[in-house]
């Protein structure tokens, strides 16, 4: 399973388990703020698809309504916005895995130094803009709950125009072109399939195999350290860890 699929599954389970933690709500609020700012200050989720996705994610993790509204107001400039901006870091982690980190910060110098430190402590290094991201493609991802007849469900999802479909644990991941994400989501829901999550992601073009328990431990610990940073929104990588190593 690719780095994105593997890590997104692990992270999804962690988010549900830790949804009561303040850090989770902080990250969700930052994502909402950035969605408004990057959308030209548009605070209407019906007119700002990225904001709509961020709000739906926040609601799925039981973020209070007032927290959501406060984050929207901060993004539209109604409250102190500081210097909030979206920034991406690219680099190589342990075992040479390619990594792209998306962050929301009001202090680029501080965040950059801290992310650099995480990379270097893991034996990796940051790289310049564009030096790693070319190894990924911007893609839409829909996570769909499985039904009893999984094979028929997968065929139906492919017929709706999905670029790729992967069976992952008790879910199905549906990959789409960015511009077709909303349309395919609507079509999937019309088929009475339950959409669990919707994301805009960077999917690795090629994967790096991680074939020992020791290497897998290093990679996953590194990913956890990045994800746990307060300013980090999403982390993408191209590692491939066999299930037998995760379950051993």
Image (spheres, helix red, strand yellow):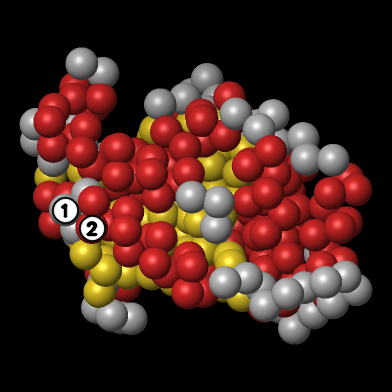
Q: Quadrant of residue 88?
A: bottom left
Mark 2 closeness class: few <14, some 14–19, many ≥20 residues within 10 Å: some
Q: Quadrant of residue 133?
A: bottom left
> In percent of the image, x 77 and y 73: which residue is there?
81
Q: Is residue 184 visible?
A: yes
Q: Quadrant of the C terminus?
A: top left
Residue in front for this viewpoint, 170 or 230: 230
The correct choice, above or below, for 1 with respect to 121 in the image is above
Residue designated by label 1: 123
Residue in front for this viewpoint, 216 or 201: 216
Tell me the element at label 1: loop
Q: Are marks 1 and 2 in contact (CB under 8 Å)?
A: yes
> In percent of the image, x 38 and y 40: which residue is there?
224
Q: Is residue 140 visible?
A: no
Q: Is residue 224 left or right of residue 128?
A: right
Residue designated by label 2: 120
The correct choice, above or below, for 11 with respect to 98 in the image is above
Q: Quadrant of the N terminus?
A: top left
Q: x, y percentage for residue 178? A: 53, 69
Q: x, y percentage for residue 165? A: 40, 46
Q: x, y percentage for residue 16? A: 60, 29
């Amino acid at each position: 399973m690719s780095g994105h699929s593997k890590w997104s599954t692990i992270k999804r389970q962690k988010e549900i388990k830790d949804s009561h933690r303040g850090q989770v709500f902080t990250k969700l609020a930052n994502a909402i703020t950035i969605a408004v700012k990057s959308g030209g200050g548009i605070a209407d989720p019906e007119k700002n698809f990225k904001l709509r996705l961020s709000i739906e994610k926040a609601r799925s993790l039981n973020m209070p309504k007032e927290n959501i509204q406060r984050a929207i107001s901060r993004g539209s400039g109604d409250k102190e916005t500081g210097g909030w901006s979206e920034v991406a870091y690219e680099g190589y982690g342990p075992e040479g895995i390619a990594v792209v980190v998306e962050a929301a910060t009001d202090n680029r110098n501080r965040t950059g130094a801290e992310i650099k430190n995480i990379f270097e402590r893991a034996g990796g290094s940051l790289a310049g803009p564009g030096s790693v991201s070319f190894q990924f493609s911007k893609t839409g991802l829909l996570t769909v709950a499985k039904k009893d007849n999984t094979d028929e469900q997968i065929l139906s999802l492919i017929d709706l125009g999905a670029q790729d479909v992967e069976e992952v644990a008790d879910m199905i991941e549906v990959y789409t072109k960015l511009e077709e994400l909303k349309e395919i989501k609507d079509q999937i829901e019309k088929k009475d399939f339950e959409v669990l999550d919707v994301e805009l992601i960077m999917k690795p073009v090629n994967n790096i195999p991680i074939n020992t328990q020791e290497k897998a431990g290093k990679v996953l610990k590194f990913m956890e350290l990045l994800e746990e940073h307060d300013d980090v929104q999403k982390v993408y990588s191209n590692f491939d860890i066999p299930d037998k190593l995760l379950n051993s």
